[in-house]
C-alpha cells in the first residue's frame, strides 16, 4: 500500500478572507506531515488564491468539477485546461451532489474523467449508492455500473494512477459514516473489478472513502487494507479537525 491521500472538498463554502485563514492554518499545521498527500479542492473563483498560497508547500489543490468539453461555446462551463492554468493537479468528478442536482449522467462523467487526464489532472471519481439501494443489497451492482461506463468506453487502464472515492450517498453530510467493514468491502470490490481487467491499474489507483469522515472514524477507516485515504467535506472546513484526519492517515 502506498502513501495515503486526504482530499478536502470545500463544496460551496468560503470567501477570500476565510480561505486565507483556513489555508494558512493548513500550511502551518501540515508542513511537517510525512507519508500523506494532501489536496484541497476549492470553488473555481478561489483557484488563484489556492495557487498563490499553496505553491511551494506540500499541499496540492484542485477543482470540484470540470466541463466535459475542451473548449467552445459552453456558457458557464470551466475546462480542464483552465483549471490546469491555475496549477491545479486534481479535479473531483461526478460528486453525487452534482450528479443528482445537475443531472450528470454516467456518460458525461466518463468523458470528464478522460478529459481531466488528457490535461494532466488527476480525476477523483466519486461513486456510491443511495440508502434504498444499500437496503436492497444492490450497492455493488450500482457502483459496478458507475465504473462500467468508463471501462466500456475507455478501458480499465485509464484507472492507473487515478483516484476513485467511494461515497455512499447516505453517508454524505449526515454524520453517519459507513462502518470500516462496509467501506472495506466496497473498496475491495472496486479494486477487484479493475484488477480483473488490468492488475497494474488496480494497484496504482487510490480508493478513498468519503462521507462524514471525522478524526474519530478515520482511525478505523484508514487502517483497512483497501482504503487509501479520505475525501473530507465538513471536517475540512475546520483546520484542526482536518489536521487530525491527515495525521491519522500519516
Ligand atoms: P462530508 O462530505 O464529509 O461533509 O460528509 C464528503 C463529500 O461529500 O465529499
Image: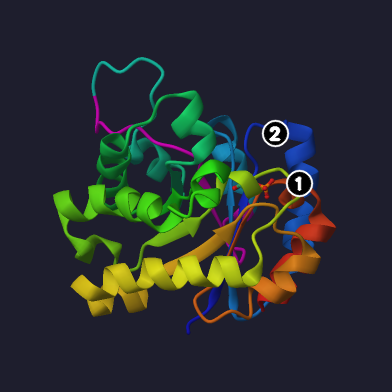
Q: Is residue 60 magenta?
A: yes
Dot 1 lies on which element? helix
Residue 205 seen in render: no
Q: Work out whether mark 2 precedes mark 1 in sequence or the reverse, and give the earlier one.
A: 2
Q: Position of residue 203 (x, y in %)?
A: 34, 79
Mark 2 and mark 1: Cα distance apart in space: 8 Å
Q: Can I make out residue 126 in this image? A: yes
* Crowd class of label 2 (few under 14; some 14 to 19; many from 20; radius 10 Å): few
Q: Is residue 171 magenta?
A: no
Q: Which labelled disc corresponds to residue 13?
A: 2
Left/right of residue 145 with respect to residue 6 in the rendered view: left
- Residue 5 picture quarter: bottom right
The residue nearer to you, when weighing 32 against 63, is 63
Residue drawn at x 56%, y 66% as measured from the top left: 183
In x, y percent, where is residue 7?
59, 57
The way the protein has been coloured in the rendering is rainbow
Q: Main secondary structure of the magenta part?
A: loop
In screen coordinates, is 11 left or right of 157? right
Amino acid at each position: 500500500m502506498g502513501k495515503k491521500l486526504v482530499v478536502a472538498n470545500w463544496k460551496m463554502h468560503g470567501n477570500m478572507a476565510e480561505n486565507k485563514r483556513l489555508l494558512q492554518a493548513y500550511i502551518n499545521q501540515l508542513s511537517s506531515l510525512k507519508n500523506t498527500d494532501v489536496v484541497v479542492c476549492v470553488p473555481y473563483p478561489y483557484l488563484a488564491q489556492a495557487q498563490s498560497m499553496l505553491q511551494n508547500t506540500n499541499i496540492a489543490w484542485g477543482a470540484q468539477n470540470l466541463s466535459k468539453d475542451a473548449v467552445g461555446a459552453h456558457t458557464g462551463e470551466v475546462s480542464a485546461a483552465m483549471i490546469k492554468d491555475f496549477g491545479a493537479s486534481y479535479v473531483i468528478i461526478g460528486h453525487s451532489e452534482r450528479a443528482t442536482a445537475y443531472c450528470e449522467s454516467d456518460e458525461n462523467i466518463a468523458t470528464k474523467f478522460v478529459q481531466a487526464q488528457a490535461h494532466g489532472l488527476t480525476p477523483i471519481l466519486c461513486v456510491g449508492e443511495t440508502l434504498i439501494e444499500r437496503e436492497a443489497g444492490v450497492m455493488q451492482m450500482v457502483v459496478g455500473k458507475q465504473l462500467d461506463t468508463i471501462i466500456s468506453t475507455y478501458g480499465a487502464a485509464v484507472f492507473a494512477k487515478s483516484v476513485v472515492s467511494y461515497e455512499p450517498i447516505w453517508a454524505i453530510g449526515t454524520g453517519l459514516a459507513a462502518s470500516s467493514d462496509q467501506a472495506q468491502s466496497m473498496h475491495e470490490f472496486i479494486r477487484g473489478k479493475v484488477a480483473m481487467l488490468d492488475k497494474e491499474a488496480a494497484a496504482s489507483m487510490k480508493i478513498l472513502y468519503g462521507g462524514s469522515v471525522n478524526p474519530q472514524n478515520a482511525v478505523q477507516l484508514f487502517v483497512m487494507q483497501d482504503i487509501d485515504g479520505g475525501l473530507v467535506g465538513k471536517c475540512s472546513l475546520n483546520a484542526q479537525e482536518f489536521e487530525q484526519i491527515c495525521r491519522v492517515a500519516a
